[in-house]
Image: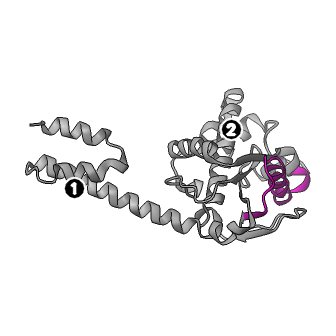
Amino acid sequence: MESIQEIKERFKNTPIQELPAFCEIYRADERKGVQKLVEQGHKRIQALEQEKERLKQMREFEREYEHLGYICGIDEVGRGPFAGPVVAGAVILPPDCEILYVNDSKQLSEKMREQLYDEIMEKAVSVAVGYASPQRIDEINILQATYEAMREAVSKLDVTPQILLNDAVTIPQITIPQVPIIKGDAKSISIAAASIVAKVTRDRLMREYDKIMPEYGFASNKGYGSKEHIEAIKKYGPTPIHRRSFIHNVTGENYE
């Protein structure tokens, strides 16, 4: 007879799709430790079914427009920081694409975002990223710079989408039909995937900036106005990646 520890190891290494068979095999084992593992297995199976149902709901917009052809989700990150670019992601997923735990990037841990980024890059029909630099943000304002980054992301896709699903905005100067969805990164799998791509791309960039300018803590604050970041600006002054139009109240200097 297998020991409980051996069964525990089997349980640990059993893929989620094989858990129902695992639970059935050990259902009649009366040892409390084994029954606890079976119970945990059932909970994981239930959680998986709930996640699949959530993803089904997140594909409602994609199903509504799938007859048009390629559907592209658009989202951005980095509107609010004092430093770094605004980054837009554009993602086209194949029909009925299932990527478990895809969600609004703000709802995910950094580790989960990195894992999902790799899966999105592997499964997507096409992925592209657009940027607007701090200098461009100062020049044309953050909203227009965000639109510019989004247009760049769309233009860099390997295929031309027939419709864009956007997180809350309608992008000017784009002829492709658009559907703005309020809180779209929590309602559309395509927009959620775009938000993850944009977030991971920008966070990686800010970590690289941190290596060059470690005084500002970019690896941890990602350019946002944390107390430590504001203190660093006051002590060391702004860097080339700071948005002058955002920090003049912090520095007391007018950069306009």
Query: In the picture provided, is 243 more to the left or to the right than 166?
Result: right
- The 10 Å Cα crowd at callout 2, few under 14, some 14 to 19, many 20 or more, is many
Disc number for residue 159: none
User: Residue 141 in magenta?
Assistant: yes
* Tag 2 residue: 206
The x and y percentages for residue 158 are 79, 46
Quadrant of the image occupied by residue 8: top left
Disc 1 marks a residue whose amino acid type is Glu
- Please report contact status of discs 2 and 1: CB closer than 8 Å, yes or no: no
| Residue furthest top in the image | 212
Q: Report if residue 67 is visible in the image.
A: yes
Q: Report if residue 254 is visible in the image.
A: no
The x and y percentages for residue 244 are 83, 47
Q: Main secondary structure of the magenta part?
A: helix
Foreground disc of the pair 2, 1? 1
Query: CA–CA distance between discs 2 and 1?
Result: 43 Å
The x and y percentages for residue 51 are 44, 60
Please name whichever residue, 138 or 130, is drawn nearer the observer in this view of the structure.
Answer: 130
Against 69, is 214 above or below? above
Please state the extent of the stretch shown in magenta in the rendering: 138-165
Please name whichever residue, 250 or 127, is drawn nearer the observer in this view of the structure.
Answer: 127
The x and y percentages for residue 242 are 78, 42
**Residue sitting at x 24%, y 36%:** 9
* Tag 1 residue: 39
Query: In the picture provided, is 177 more to the left or to the right than 192?
Result: right
